[in-house]
Image (cartoon, rainbow, N blue to C red):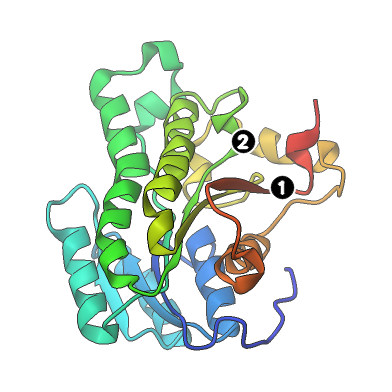
Amino acid sequence: MTQIPDGTALAGKRALVLGVANEHSIAYGCARVFRRLGAQIALTYLDERAKPFVEPLARELDAPVLAPCDVRKDGDLEAVFAQVAETWGGLDIALHAIAFAPANDLQGRLVDSSREGFGIAMDVSCHSFVRMARLAAPLMSEGGTLLTMSYHGASKVVPNYNLMGPVKAALESAVRYLAYELGDRGIRVHAVSPGPLKTRAASGLKDFDLLLNQAIQRAPIGELVDIDDVGLTAAFLTTPYAARLTGTTVYVDGGLSIMA
């Protein structure tokens, strides 16, 4: 695992992290780095089945907010932000690490995807980020940073990524438009695009182990990234070091995305 430096770069910052499933989640890696750098953390979990896996992580991170959030349920996201507002009165960082597509649509060809499956994938994986931004903006009275997670399949064809490619492309476009719309409020917006990672969500992709092996062989650095690598990049984007950056998709993939 990547060594996480101690520091105070995020001291006093309040960070909401959506989408933690377990200790292998990208969302948890980001939350852990944020906390190590001094931020206060709020976490969400999907449902009661996920809660036992996330509760210990919330205790580890001293999170004063741990709330259920299924973005497909009306009111769940709003309830999370109401709790954040009541607890902190404001917000500096909101990270969206939520994606889903029905298995049949995810594992089949894009051309065979169902209207319903495509709509679900777009709602959960893309439009929920837009809704998050709408709820977060009023709490970021002194500016802030919105982050989401993408993948190289948004801009290039990755075999077996299927309908999630167009969905992530829409997500990256949403990042650019939100950056434009919220920039005058001091709110910066970014997508972070990790290389292949062993997460529960990624395990649903067909031949994912082959994708991991190819990443190791083709990446200039010759190693897979881990959740802490993603967290460190996300943290950088929330600091004054990135004060003049917005609307970007930042790759954290050991250079894999530069290869033909």
Residue occupying image coordinates x 54% and y 53%: 246
| Residue situated in front as seen by the camera: 134 or 199 | 134
> Which residue sits furthest top?
111
For this view, does 121 lie left or right of residue 13?
left
- How far across and how far down the image is residue 129, in percent? 35, 49
- Name the amino acid, label 1: Asp
Residue occupying image coordinates x 12% and y 58%: 75
Residue occupying image coordinates x 62% and y 60%: 230
For this view, does 122 lie left or right of residue 196?
left
Give the Cα separation between the discs numbered 1 and 2.
Answer: 9 Å
Residue occupying image coordinates x 31% and y 62%: 137
The reply to whether the C-beta atoms of the residues labelled 1 and 2 are less than 8 Å apart is: yes
* Label 1 residue SS: loop
Q: Quadrant of the N terminus?
A: bottom right
- Based on the displayed image, in which of its 4 quarters is residue 125 positioned? top left
For this view, does 151 lie left or right of residue 53?
right
| Residue situated in front as seen by the camera: 201 or 29 | 29
Q: Is residue 190 above or below residue 237?
A: above
- Name the amino acid, label 2: His
The residue labelled by disc 1 is 253
The residue labelled by disc 2 is 152
